[in-house]
Image: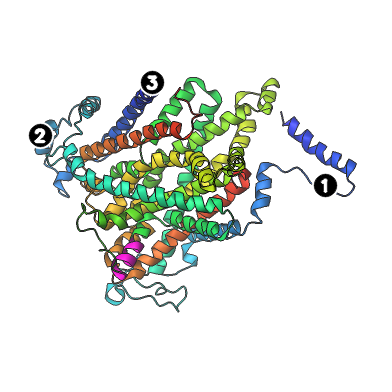
């Protein structure tokens, strides 16, 4: 077990290096001066521009900039934004809100998605199953901004169940609507994956054996069928936590949640290259960590998968 | 060398059948492709979504056929957020007017082009790039596979939306092609993985060994023997992904980092309509509805194609 974890951690290193390098060079090689944005529509003053560039180390060769950037990352320094605040500060300010939102959405998609998938998988071809297929298809087809506005209008403005936008991002009851919208797309995928997996495994020999030896139905489904059917779902969920953090950009914008997505979007609009690459590097770390956890979970679900 | 083995079996089976049963019609053994087509024509979902997509493509090619109104001509004085007149079919005021007094119907029609072009071009680019890299990695293995696989790992660490934001942020003037570029640059690794896995399975088949024994060259084996047999999963993933790319373009345009104003896009219209969502919900409803319908059509098509090409998943 320990060896497996160590191996997976070692494998993460090149991926992390590559991803951060990719982001760094995308930000710095593509056209567009990161500092020129400070002047807005006016032409930047060349002397001031040069001085600022020197001060922030932007006049050094690209490779050197990258090396110092990586060195800083490893010591937990995600760079400084143009207003002088460390990027890590901005992240830690906004992170709790987004983590809460993402976990909330995650919980909704797991509980509701697996429940729906389980029921329609067990009653394959029945009315409930057909309804699930149509409903999930609609959820997948409706883009998130559209869904966000529809939900906001219906529940926020017409029915007045909740306030249309979030007033206090730290109040979890106000995050219900954004979390439902954020989790809806993944919910549809989780439900469909669970359904297919259950419908496939229900014909497996081990299920027949479990029924034949007289186990109660609850136990057959809970311990044998569901656990074995969770493997594709867990694979999907692993990459999904990172996607939820990224997808929060849209949801946080619509519902005015002051989280990472909001801050990242502002940084992009202000053309703050350093802030953007800091944020993205951080989110990539979250993404990779989620992948690691999934790999460890596999073995819990399926003992045939060995920590080799 | 033509595929000797295949021809022979397809000739043999009907002959055996006629020997023991008198009547059965001489049915040619169908290839995977024509078998899938045979299944698909009988599926209502496939027919409906294919017709919808055909209509969308026609709209994208010749929007002038459906409306004679200029989608960029605004008349603020007379038409600022005028309510729709549902009786006047195909006229300028059918879906009402937007914030700048422009005909929403005309904008919905002209907006199809951006979505369709982005969807098709990104899918084509991703399939070609991912297909080639996946084939190389899967067939040759060794260090080529190691390099390509590590590169795909790296790209998989970046969520599509985040990466697209970073790339598009660098363009000061963004056209359809910059959006296509960003999505292809980030999305090709998905196809690489699918193709690689598929090629690795096909590579071990007997007909590949046979082709090698007959002295076929690498190019011939790759394109004549492996590619046709390994392409099915790629087609399935590509069709389903197409709808997703259209949704991503609209999301990016909605965020203000995708397409820009002279281009007409449903995403941009959704963005500008959100300011007046309380007073003029119709300004949001029509572009949003068309967008959802388009994505739905492509996803339904993808579902149907998957069922036809991969009977195991049914």
Q: Which residue is mark 2?
A: A51
The chain identifier of the residue carrying mark 3 reads A
Taking A305 as reference, is A38 above or below it? Answer: below
| Depth check, front residue: A284 or A296 | A296
**Does residue B184 sit above or below A183 in this rendering?**
above
Question: Does the image show residue B118?
Answer: no
Which marked residue is nearer to the observer: mark 2 or mark 3? 3
Q: Which residue is at a point 36% across and 63% down the rendered structure image?
A: A150
Q: Give x and y (percent) for residue A223.
A: 49, 41
Q: Which mark is residue B67?
A: none
Give the SS element for disc 1: loop
Asked whether the residues under marks 2 and 3 belong to the same chain, the reply is: yes
Residue B234 on the magenta span = no
In the displayed structure, does residue B21 sit left or right of residue B183?
right
Which segment is the magenta one?
Answer: A149-159
- Identify the mark nearer the N-term, 2 or 3: 3
The chain letter for the residue carrying disc 1 is B
The residue that mark 1 highlights is B26
- In three-dimensional space, the C-alpha distance between marks 3 and 1, rounded to whole angstroms, equals 61 Å
Question: Residue A81, how many percent across, how many down?
Answer: 16, 39
- Residue B184, quarter of the rendered image: top left
SS under mark 3: helix
What's the CA distance linking mark 2 and mark 3?
50 Å
Of the pair A247 and A130, the residue shown nearer to us: A130
What is the crowding at mark 2: few (fewer than 14 residues within 10 Å), some, or many (at least 20)? few
Describe the element under mark 2 as helix, strand or loop: helix
- The label on residue A3 is 3
């Amino acid at each position: 077990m320990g060896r497996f974890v160590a191996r997976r951690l070692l494998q993460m290193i090149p991926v992390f290096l590559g991803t951060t390098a990719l982001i760094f060079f995308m930000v710095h090689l593509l056209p567009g001066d990161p500092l020129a944005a400070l002047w807005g529509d006016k032409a930047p003053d060349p002397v001031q521009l040069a001085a600022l560039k020197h001060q922030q180390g932007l006049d050094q060769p690209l490779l050197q900039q990258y090396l110092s950037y990586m060195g800083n990352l490893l010591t937990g320094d995600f760079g400084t934004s143009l207003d002088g605040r460390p990027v890590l500060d901005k992240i830690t300010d906004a992170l709790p809100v987004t983590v809460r939102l993402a976990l909330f959405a995650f919980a909704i998609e797991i509980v509701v998605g697996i429940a729906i998938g389980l029921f329609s998988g067990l009653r394959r071809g029945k009315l409930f199953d057909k309804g699930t297929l149509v409903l999930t298809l609609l959820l997948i087809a409706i883009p998130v901004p559209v869904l966000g506005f529809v939900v906001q209008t219906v529940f926020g403005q017409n029915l007045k169940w909740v306030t249309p936008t979030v007033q206090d991002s730290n109040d979890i009851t106000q995050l219900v609507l954004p979390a439902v919208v954020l989790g809806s797309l993944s919910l549809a995928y989780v439900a469909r994956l669970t359904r297919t997996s259950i419908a496939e495994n229900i014909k497996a020999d081990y299920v027949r054996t479990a029924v034949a030896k007289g186990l109660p139905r609850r136990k057959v489904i809970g311990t044998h069928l569901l656990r074995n059917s969770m493997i594709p779902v867990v694979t999907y969920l692993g990459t999904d936590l990172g996607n939820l953090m990224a997808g929060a950009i849209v949801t946080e914008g619509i519902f005015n949640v002051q989280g990472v997505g909001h801050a990242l979007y502002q940084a992009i609009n202000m053309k703050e290259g350093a802030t953007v690459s800091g944020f993205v590097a951080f989110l990539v770390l979250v993404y990779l960590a989620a992948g690691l956890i999934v790999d460890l979970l596999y073995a819990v679900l399926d003992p045939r998968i060995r920590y080799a | 060398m033509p595929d000797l083995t295949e021809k022979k079996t397809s000739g043999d089976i009907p002959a055996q059948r006629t020997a023991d049963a008198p009547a059965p019609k001489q049915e040619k053994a169908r290839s995977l492709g024509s078998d899938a087509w045979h299944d698909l024509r009988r599926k209502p979902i496939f027919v409906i979504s294919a017709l919808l997509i055909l209509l969308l493509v026609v709209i994208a090619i010749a929007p002038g056929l459906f409306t004679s109104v200029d989608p960029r001509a605004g008349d603020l004085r007379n038409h600022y957020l005028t309510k729709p007149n549902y009786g006047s079919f195909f006229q300028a005021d059918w879906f009402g007017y937007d914030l700048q007094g422009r005909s929403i119907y005309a904008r919905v029609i002209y907006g199809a082009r951006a979505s369709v072009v982005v969807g098709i071009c990104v899918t084509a680019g991703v399939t070609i790039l991912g297909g080639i890299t996946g084939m190389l990695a899967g067939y040759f293995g060794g260090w080529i596979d190691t390099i390509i696989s590590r590169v795909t790992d790296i790209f998989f660490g970046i969520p599509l939306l985040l990466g697209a934001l970073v790339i598009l942020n660098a363009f000061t003037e963004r056209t359809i092609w910059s959006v296509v570029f960003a999505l292809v640059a980030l999305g090709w690794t998905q196809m690489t993985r699918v193709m690689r896995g598929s090629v690795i399975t096909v590579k071990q088949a007997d007909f590949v060994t046979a082709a090698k024994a007959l002295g076929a060259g690498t190019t011939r084996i790759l394109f004549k023997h492996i590619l046709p047999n390994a392409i099915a999963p790629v087609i399935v993933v590509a069709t389903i992904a197409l709808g997703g790319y259209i949704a991503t373009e609209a999301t990016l345009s909605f965020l203000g980092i995708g397409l820009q104003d002279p281009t007409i896009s449903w995403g941009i219209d959704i963005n500008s309509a959100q300011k007046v969502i309380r007073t003029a919900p119709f300004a949001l409803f029509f572009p949003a509805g068309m967008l959802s319908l388009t994505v739905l059509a492509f996803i339904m098509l993808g579902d149907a194609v998957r069922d036809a090409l991969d009977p195991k998943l049914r």
